[in-house]
Amino acid sequence: MSKLYVLPCLLPIAYVVALVVEYLCDKLLLSKKAILAEWECTYIAPVCSRRIIVALIYAGLVAAYCFSVSIKGQILSSLLLVQLVIVCIIDYKYQFIFDEQNILLAITGLARIMDYPTIWKEPLAAAVGAFVVMFILAIISRGAMGGGDVKLMTALGIWLGVWGIMNAFFYGVIAGGVGALALLIFSKKGRKDFFAFGPYLCLGAIYAWYLQASNW
């Protein structure tokens, strides 16, 4: 069957997944009221417009289906991309990446390692290296890059491997620089204001995944 005929079938799947994502995000954010209050944030359901969530998840499913070459690769790619969508939405809105998100990302990334059991040392090295580099940057940046970003890149190291996580960081920083410049130009942020860096790291990770998707 041509891939073109499958694409419309992914839309109802995206809608169901979006409902599940919306429910889980609501439960997570409601359980973190105290933490959000410390950041002077108040959560009011829903986390995001359902149309936006459905559109983003549908785009992720289409990308996973079109660029991954195996059924297992398509499933793994869908898991990765959907989780990155969730991270982007929550971090963009609240400038916070919860530990539960990063833990789930790391756990599901272990399924990716099982594809290559003889080279498990590479994703482990990528995770450790990402943690060390990001931890140092978090200290140097004095809060501009938070602990959630550190844990996010550590989890992504399991998914992407050494070269993948390097690409994710490189392109994420470029995207973040462009985003910061745009916020300054349009007076959305001042020079000393913090902004969510996680979505840009996710964009870098998505591009890094795209570069290696043909091997999934």
Image: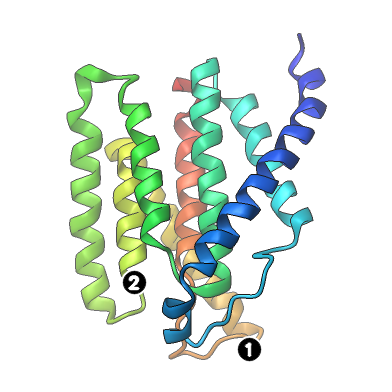
> Furthest residue to the top?
1
Q: Nearer the viewer, residue 19 or 179?
A: 19
Q: Which residue is mark 1?
A: 187
Q: CA distance from mark 2 to mark 1?
A: 23 Å
Q: Quadrant of residue 27?
A: bottom right
Residue drawn at point x = 18 percent, y = 40 percent:
125
| Amino acid bearing label 1 | Ser
Residue drawn at point x = 78 percent, y = 35 percent:
11
Q: Is residue 176 left or right of residue 21?
A: left
Q: Is residue 2 left or right of residue 113?
A: right
| Position of 55 relative to 71 (above/below) | below
**Residue 108 image offset from top left, x and y in percent:** 39, 36
Rate crowding at label 1 as few (under 14), some (14 to 19) or many (20 or more) other CA atoms within 10 Å. Answer: few
- The answer to the question of whether label 2 and label 1 lie on touching residues, with beta carbons closer than 8 A, is no
Kindly tell me whether residue 167 is visible in this rendering.
no
Q: Where the N terminus falls, by quadrant?
A: top right
Instruction: Mark 2 vs mark 1: give the one in front.
Output: 2
Q: Quadrant of residue 14?
A: top right
Q: Is residue 52 left or right of residue 157?
A: right
Residue 159 tag number: none
**Residue 112 image offset from top left, x and y in percent:** 37, 28
Residue drawn at point x = 74 percent, y = 18 percent:
3
Kindly tell me whether residue 40 is visible in this rendering.
yes
Residue drawn at point x = 59 percent, y = 30 percent:
64
Chain-order first, disc 2 or disc 1:
2
**Residue 78 image offset from top left, x and y in percent:** 56, 34
Q: How is the image coloured?
A: rainbow
Q: Is residue 84 left or right of residue 158?
A: right
| Position of 71 relative to 191 (above/below) | above
| Amino acid bearing label 2 | Gly
Q: Which residue is mark 2?
A: 146
**Residue 210 image offset from top left, x and y in percent:** 52, 35
